[in-house]
Amino acid sequence: MSPPDSMTEIWVYLSAQPLLWLTLTLAVYLLAMALHRKAGGHPAVNPVLVSVTVLVSLLLATGTPYQRYFDGAQFVHFLLGPTTVALAIPLHGQLKRLLAMGGPLLIALVVGSLTAGLSAYVIGALLGASAPTVASLAPKSVTTPIAMGIAERLGGLASLTAVFVIVTGIFGAIFAAGILKRLGVKDDASIGFAMGLASHGIGTARAFQINEQTGAFAALAMGLNGLFTALTLPWLLPMLSPLLR
Amino acid sequence: MIAAFALLLTFQLAGEALRVALHLPVPGPVIGMALLLVYLIIRRGPSQPLRQTSGNLLQNLSLMFVPAGTGVMLHAGRLVDEAWPIAIALVASTVLGLAATGLTLHYLTHGRKAGETP
């Protein structure tokens, strides 16, 4: 057997195994993290964005269907569930602060969460986006594992929602602090809470770069908004949908 | 580590079971998160292994977005066809959400303080 033939045979065998794409997912992510560190943690060099771009290029170049890729990557995807449960631990850590500022935080949560979710839905629908797209847009301010679950319940597409969530997070991480300052919102608690609420984990990571206090409020807002959106959107959106058609 | 992971999975499983039993519109892991929060309040905080395992998982949260994010290749056509509604809805709603949250909290905490100072 000539070397090119055996190479092809090895590829044909390995590409059919879950191991190949699982390993590549981890390897590409590690490279993206290294690049992120090299860029000084700049929010635009987002590790998820870089990983997805590289993996999609590899899949298209090798003609591998997404389903074959996901057979391997599903083991990483599965960890979203227990990690969502684990969000209870940082949330518990912020419990005292939450109770101390309870009233104002809850009002800001309700106002902000409904504004972010419903405005995405209404603007998307008014501009003529299709029903699955609009349902995938609505939970875009919520952390990915929760957003994907909500989108599926609303008739959206979980993987499309993941893309919207990531884009929202990157946008918030880059622009949120500047927008809030321009609006006259200058205290750490309000900036952090707004960043965590509107742009979830990626915004929270950015808030921790500003300072501890801002980061803590962002983490709190991310957890609360996940819970609140999951509890409200699946009931509210079906009521809104007849208004839009 | 395994005990802590088993605990997280147990709460997720309990969340899924409750969701199916009560026909709740909330994802199972979110119910599991709420149940674990109640457990932590009763137990007055997480054990060291649970804190460590959760910390490890949450530190690598970005990695877990990758398989789903790669699914963007399935939606390339939709993203191109609906590029404008999607881009405008995402940017506008994120700015509105930021402004609504930040202004509300700022007004409620600082507006009141400013009124109290003579």
Image: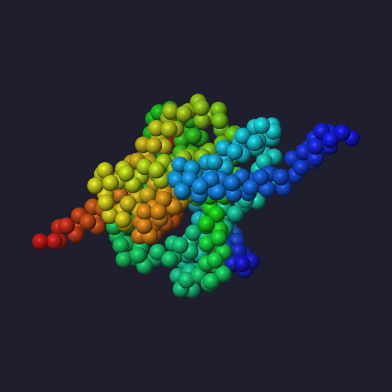
Residue at (13, 61) in percent of width and height: B117
Left or right of A203: which side holds A75?
right
Quarter of the image with the N terminus of chain A in it: top right
Q: Is B87 drawn above or below residue A236 in the view shown?
A: above
Residue B52: name its quadrant.
bottom right
Residue plotted at (65% across, 32% down): A60
Q: Residue B32: in sight, yes or no? A: no
- B7 in relation to A218, above or below: below
Residue in the foreground of this view, choosing between B25 and A80: A80
The location of residue B39, given as percent across then percent down, is: 50, 69
Q: Considering depth in this image, is B87 or A210 the residue closer to the camera?
A: A210
Side of A209 where B51 appears, left or right = right
Q: Nearer the viewer, residue A19 or B88?
A: A19
Q: Position of residue A111 (x, y in %)?
A: 32, 49
Query: What colour scheme does the image use?
Result: rainbow
x 44%, y 45%: residue: A43
Q: Quadrant of the C terminus of chain A?
A: top left
Q: Residue furthest bottom?
A: B43
Q: Which residue does the image show at 76% across and 42% down from the upper left? A: A14
Residue at the outermost right position: A1
- A190 shown above or below A54: below
Confirm whether residue A104 shows in the render. Answer: yes
Which residue is at the far front? Answer: A38
Q: Position of residue A209 (x, y in %)?
A: 40, 54
Q: Report x, y in % for residue B108.
A: 24, 55
